[in-house]
Image: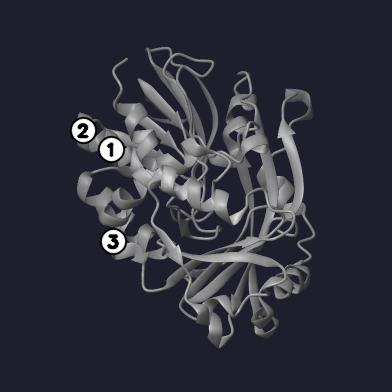
């Protein structure tokens, strides 16, 4: 016989967004909240396998709104999660002379418009770059987050707040409950579990449409990217530094606090595949695509191209790669924006689908949740 469990709200997905949402609902509404997570721990997928950048807006000169929102959210995130942040490094943005979508002048004006502080890089840093390929270099204020510390703190706060989280539990189908509200059928190691609640929040990121398709609900238009972020030991010149080369087919290198290494991504070589969710009959589960991928690292291509702009990169030492599916809205293909997806009554009254493209989107999500119905 299937077990059943009644609650006020169900959050499907125990990533950073799902956990923050569950905490917010519990604290503001005193609701009984259950988080459903298929992994052994929270924040093991996209919340971990990324570049760990706390965005302050510099990354988005083609989307003034994304830059502004990041600049607003950056201090808020940095203060709230200060014990989970590495701010003990220097951050630099360089602008390429060719094939860049912005010039150095345009980048400086963009930062002024969104209120993002920057200053010329010291000459000792500028000398690290190829002057024939790099137009200018700026020092900026940007941090990295430690996903392991975030996870540990999140678990403590959820336990203290009384949020129930069910690990190794996979949501299969959502539908209307016979007793009112919505029901979610789950698979656990002990068999099937039925959950019922007035509100269900789908925070499964890359798998947003998997739940919708299984429930015979319309899909949300999404773009998926199979990605590789390399983890490296950097040369002495780059220790305690982050570098982002703007703004086209270029690269970024950031401290990755959870491993004590640096992450390296390259716009051209990080991508190993791209597909869209459109036709339900052609749907592919992103996790299955990832699991079946060959995972042949393109690190050598990444670092070889980076060396042209930053010659000391030749001394990088490869350690590992993070493989994940990155999911964005199709509109982001045109302006590189990173808006949050927040769809209420997504095929069913009471079902909300949420997808955040970067970690500071968490406050945009909370703003949506707090809006009156």
Q: Which residue is mark 1?
A: 24
Q: Residue at x 56, y 58 (%)?
A: 49
Q: Residue at x 73, y 24 (%)?
A: 280
- Is 352 in front, or is 313? 313
Q: Position of residue 132 (x, y in %)?
A: 72, 71
* Residue 142 visible in the snapshot: no
Report helix, strand or loop for mark 2. Answer: helix
Q: Residues within 10 Å of mark 3 (few under 14, many from 20)?
A: few
Q: Position of residue 199 (x, y in %)?
A: 37, 23
- Which is more N-terminal, label 2 or label 3? 2
- Which is more N-terminal, label 3 or label 1? 1
Q: Which residue is mark 3?
A: 82
User: Does 70 appear above or below 50?
Assistant: above
Dot label at residue 165: none
Question: Spatial distance from mark 1 to mark 2, Cα to Cα?
Answer: 6 Å
Mark 3 vs mark 2, foreground winner is 3
Q: Is residue 326 left or right of 17 when viewed as pictured?
A: right
Report helix, strand or loop for mark 3. Answer: helix
Q: Which residue is mark 2?
A: 28
Circles 1 and 2, Cβ within 8 Å, touching? The answer is: yes
- Is 6 in front, or is 359? 359
């Amino acid at each position: 016989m299937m077990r059943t469990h009644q609650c006020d709200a169900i959050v499907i997905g125990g990533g950073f967004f799902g956990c923050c949402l569950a905490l917010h609902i519990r604290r503001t509404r005193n609701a009984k909240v259950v988080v459903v997570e298929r992994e052994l721990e929270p924040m093991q997928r996209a919340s971990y396998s990324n570049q760990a950048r706390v965005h302050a807006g510099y990354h988005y000169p083609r989307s003034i709104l994304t830059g502004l929102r990041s600049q607003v959210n950056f201090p808020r995130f940095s203060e709230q999660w200060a014990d989970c942040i590495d701010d003990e490094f220097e951050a630099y943005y360089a602008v390429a002379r060719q094939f860049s979508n912005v010039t150095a002048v345009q980048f400086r004006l963009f930062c002024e418009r969104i209120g993002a502080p920057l200053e010329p890089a010291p000459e000792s840093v500028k000398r690290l770059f190829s002057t024939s390929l790099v137009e200018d270099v700026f020092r900026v204020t940007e941090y990295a987050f430690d996903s392991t510390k975030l996870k540990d703190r999140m678990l403590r706060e959820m336990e203290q707040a009384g949020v129930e989280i069910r690990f190794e539990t996979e949501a299969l189908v959502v539908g209307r409950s016979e007793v009112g509200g919505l029901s979610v059928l789950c698979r656990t190691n002990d068999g099937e579990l039925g959950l019922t609640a007035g509100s269900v929040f789908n925070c499964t990121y890359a798998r947003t449409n998997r739940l919708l398709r299984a429930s015979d609900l319309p899909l949300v238009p999404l773009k998926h990217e199979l990605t590789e972020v390399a983890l490296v030991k950097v040369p002495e010149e780059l220790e305690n530094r982050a570098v982002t080369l703007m703004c086209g087919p270029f690269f970024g290198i950031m401290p990755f606090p959870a491993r004590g290494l640096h992450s390296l991504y390259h716009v051209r070589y990080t991508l190993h595949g791209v597909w869209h969710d459109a036709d339900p009959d052609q749907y592919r589960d992103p996790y299955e695509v990832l699991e079946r991928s060959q995972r042949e690292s393109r690190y050598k291509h990444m670092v070889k191209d980076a060396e042209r702009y930053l010659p000391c990169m030749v001394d990088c030492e490869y350690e590992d790669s993070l493989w994940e599916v990155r999911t964005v809205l199709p509109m982001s293909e045109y302006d590189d924006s990173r808006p949050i997806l927040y769809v209420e009554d997504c095929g069913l009254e009471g079902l909300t689908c949420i997808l955040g493209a970067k970690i500071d989107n968490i406050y945009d999500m909370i703003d949506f949740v707090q809006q009156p119905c």
